Image (cartoon, helix red, strand yellow):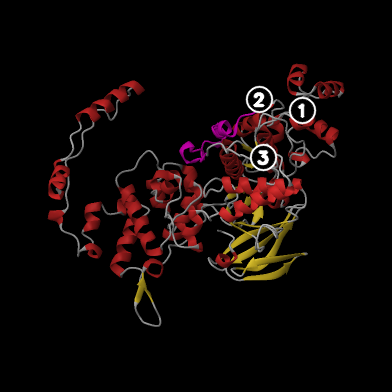
Amino acid sequence: MAFNNNEQGEWYTVSCGQCTFTLPVRYQNLGLIGQGTYGIVVRATDTATGKYVAIKKLLRPFQTHIHAKRTYRELKLLMYLNHPDAQVIQLYNVFTPEQDVNEFQTLYLVLNFVDRDLNRFILQRVPFTEQVIKLTIYSILRGLKFIHSAGILHRDLKPANIGVDRHNNVSILDFGLARVASTGAHTDYVSTRWWRAPEIYVNEKKYNEKVDIWSVGCIMAELILLKPLFPGKDTIDQLNKIFDIIGTPDSKTLQEICTPEASAYISRMEYKPKANFNELFGFKYDPLTETPISGVSSEGVDLLDRLLSFDPRQRPTAEEALNYPFLKLYHEPMEEPTIETMIDEHLDTEYTKEQWKSIVWQMVEEFLPPSWILDFGLASVASICPATTYVCTRWWRAPEIYLNEKKYNEKIDIWSVGCIMAELILHKPLFPGQTKFDQLNKIFDIIGTPDLATLSEICTSGYFMRKILETSTYMSQMEPRPKTNFNELFGYQIDPSTGRTISGVSPEGVDLLDQLLSFDPRQRPTAEQALSHPFLEFYHDPDDEPTIEPMINEHQNAEYTKEQWKAIVWQMVEEFIPPSWIDNDAIDDS
């Protein structure tokens, strides 16, 4: 049981801000992050890992049956959406100091720590480059694609709920207002007013995941203008400010989207034409250098125009928005996680406060920290590889696949061998990147930034070269850095009391690993050359290492239909003969 007091270890009580925390002793050095209506969040050091975490203490989680249901819903969503690579806040641990359900009044959530939220960057009033805007909006939409695939609406997207960690990775925070989508009526308390979709005002009981898409549009506009786009003082003022920008909808749209009362009211409002989006959000140029100093390209304006459609049917889904040309540099469908629709057996049930409390107690009791957290020291390693294959692939993927994705050879496998060797030494993945840019960031943390000559020969994209070499933007992911000392990182580690080797490899092993992890694939050895390295001489026997003739695939470049491929596979299955050594093994065992 995750919250079992014995398993959590010793407990202690400490004050932070105006609140008292009773925590396992592993969580130390508390610092206040913020407090809201339903919870207070502090930063803490997890002494088991040496890393910062955020701890949220829910305030009055079971005060009423409404509070209890909200507590259940937030915990349910955090548990279901827990994922290492989805741009969503991660749940590390859940616990309560109470001994049984009858005493149960306190609940703590341990989450991944993010240094800042997007609002803090906006308040600095420093214009964002288009690349930063692209990466930020891509990351939010990537997270929404995951959330919406589960059938969940966030309902409170705003800059303050977009976290940015010290590696500039974006996470969607605060699922306190989130809920499972349904065909029934919704509550009207959704999101802070300035980022709230218009259909919530004009048809408050009927909306879908497109309310989150509107909020993304508001955030994107705010990244461009460095101020909220629709800072309404009340509902009517909010609609007026929306129509100042997107124009008054036509009568047909009003009739289809609004309640009759809302449609009639808007029809009586002053008609407003749509603002010129290119003038408002497009590039603004430095008159001296003629380079963009703010705004976005026409492709960005087009995406923003669609995100801020009054008619939610005209807004793209998160998945559709990711396909827009504005985001093509980052969009990788195979690396954007989705999840099965969440089935909530308690969704439409009316429970008492005590019944909700019992359900939450059971959820806390059954919670297990996710495997990717275990990998980094919370417990023994349960699984090196997270459940999703695309994340695993990225962590062991050679850099040339990112920088010259149309041209690579067998040396990509050699890089992967280097990653595996490093992992055997360190007992954790060497390059656990969250996005392809974070992946390059982590690679260069270890092997150093390649020189310009190597970059020009290996990379096909001038953008990547500039991104790697520039440090001018606050979010620069590719800051130049020196190579890590491989001997210190991977070499023998000696027990000072016994003088014995406790981990690491010899200088020969370090040298081989250094070659395997060369940025330039031309500098990596082939598999045959690596086998001849002194580190492996004890095992290497060229006469006992099989090879085979190159495979000739007559179908390799053919464009077949699905049915033709199926017929070819059928024939292959039909003609398959078990290999002779299988028969021999069977005879030997008999």
Residue 206 is covered by the magenta coloring:
no
Kindly give the residue lying farthest to the top in the view shown: 252
Q: Where 575 sits versus 533, above or below?
A: above
As rendered, which of 132 and 471 lies closer to the eye?
A: 132
The magenta segment: 313-338
The amino acid on which the numbered mark 2 sits, given as a three-letter code, is: Arg
Total numbered labels: 3
The amino acid on which the numbered mark 1 sits, given as a three-letter code, is: Asn
The residue tagged 1 is 203
The alpha-carbon separation of the residues under discs 2 and 1 comes to: 14 Å
Residue at disc 3, secondary structure: strand
Relative placement, left or right, of 273 versus 435 is: right
The residue tagged 3 is 179
Q: Which mark is residue 313?
A: 2
Whole-percent x, y for residue 485 in the image: 41, 67
Whole-percent x, y for residue 243 in the image: 79, 29
As rendered, which of 409 and 204 lies closer to the eye?
A: 204
Mark 2 closeness class: few <14, some 14–19, many ≥20 residues within 10 Å: few
Mark 1 closeness class: few <14, some 14–19, many ≥20 residues within 10 Å: some
